[in-house]
Image (cartoon, rainbow, N blue to C red):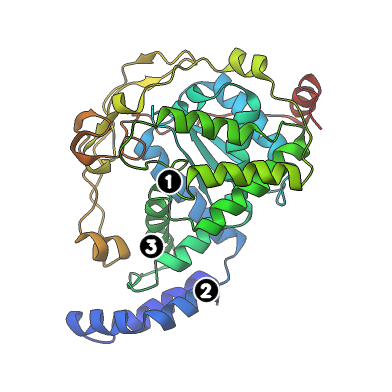
Amino acid sequence: MNAIAHLVLVCLVFGFASPAAAQLGGLLNQGARRAKQFNDFRWSNEEKAALGQQVSELVRARYGVVQDAAVHKYVTLVGTVLAQKSTKPNLPWTFIVLDTDAVNAFAAPHGYVHITRGALALMRNEAELAGVLAHEIVHVTDEHTVDALKKNTLKGAAAEAAAGDNKLIEFLADAAYKNILDNAYSRGDENSSDRQGIILINKAGYAPQGLGSFLNTLAERNKGATEKRGLFDSHPEMAARLERLTASITKDALTSTQDLSARFTGAISYKPVPQAQIATVAGGSKGLTGGSTSKASGQSKAEPEPPAEQPRKRGFGLSRLAKGGGSESKSAQVVGSGGARGLDPEKDAKGGSNPALVAVKVSPADIQAFKKAGQLT
């Protein structure tokens, strides 16, 4: 019996044993047992790949994808240089630039790394880009998204009773998507990704100060915010986080020096949008409208409205228990700039309408030439 089938059986055993009210009480009372069963869960590569693909689809539907092959190739080259030095170089790594002014990045299982054009706009050199990508790569290689699922999805709430593997993967992908948008990684996972990330970029030849430099810029941008927002300005606390990064550079004797600012500015020319001016959408709506960026300059063009989403059957899940049920709004009502009505401009930012992946081919010769030109290892 494979892992998904095993969990399906667990769900079925708990899901159909009693009427709805008794079922809910029984499920909640056995949260500890269920959590242990999930912690003992063994994922196959195929299951991780299916989960990662569906999480990425949800992220791309939420924010859209920049339809610029040159930008994607550049980000993919930087990411591939790092991935090859990671603990899992043979994963099918995919690097995706999301079409939103928000400053954020998201990792999904089995090699999916997403970064927003808003984050690219705030960067000044390739070492900063490498620092952010490496942080997300470590989230993937150390399977922090799967760990967050174990801690947050079957602990104190019921998994859906699923009719088959695909439905269960769909449920878990939806939960993982909400986890990464809500920054559900533990403090330990974040600290580990910081430290291992700067070790990774140093190994590739990039200045290990890149991540801290970007975080400093982000902290300056967000200094007027009344709340801690977004993936990079949440936990751990920024000042302590920067101190740990600096200490790690000394302790681990990280001495690489390449920042490659000229190459970065030649490839990326987005302009940052102040946090208070980022357009947001009501309730983290999916199916967003608003143009899809087609050039690295950040200029947008009008895109046709996306087709209406078909309603999906939803059962009982963690988000419904915590938030009172119901799916996210299907309309893309823009409600103003960041901070309006209590929205988080980094999470609730308006995005582009085109979720399609941009096909990028990066050959071994491309990677070798890229490394040679940047004096990377």
Q: Which amino acid does the dot numbered 2 rest on?
A: Asn
| In the foreground, 65 or 347 | 347
Q: Which amino acid does the dot numbered 1 rest on?
A: Ser
Q: Indicate left or right for 77 with 276 as reference.
A: right
Question: How far apart are the two marked residues, 3 and 2, measured between alpha carbons?
Answer: 20 Å
Q: Are marks 3 and 2 in contact (CB under 8 Å)?
A: no
| In the foreground, 170 or 121 | 121
> Is the residue 259 above or below the residue 204 in the image?
above
Q: Indicate left or right for 75 with 226 as reference.
A: right
**Residue 190 x %, y %:** 54, 52
| In the foreground, 258 or 51 | 258
| Residue occupying image coordinates x 28% and y 82% | 16
The quadrant of the picture occupied by the C terminus is top right
Q: Secondary structure at mark 2?
A: helix
**Residue 118 x %, y %:** 44, 27
What residue is disc 2 on? 39
**Residue 152 x %, y %:** 41, 65
Which comes sooner in the sequence, label 3 or label 2?
Answer: 2
Q: Which amino acid does the dot numbered 3 rest on?
A: Lys
Question: How far apart are the two marked residues, 1 and 2, measured between alpha carbons?
Answer: 26 Å
| Residue occupying image coordinates x 78% and y 19% | 373
> Is the residue 321 above or below the residue 327 in the image?
below
Residue neighbourhood size for the residue with mark 1, other residues' Cα within 10 Å, grouped as few (<14), some (14–19), many (≥20): few
Q: Secondary structure at mark 1?
A: loop
Q: Residue 231 falls in which quadrant of the image?
A: top left
What residue is disc 1 on? 234
What residue is disc 3 on? 167
Q: Residue 61 falls in which quadrant of the image?
A: top left
| Residue occupying image coordinates x 40% and y 71% | 154
Which comes sooner in the sequence, label 1 or label 2?
Answer: 2
Counting the numbered discs, the total is: 3
Q: Indicate left or right for 130 with 34 as reference.
A: right
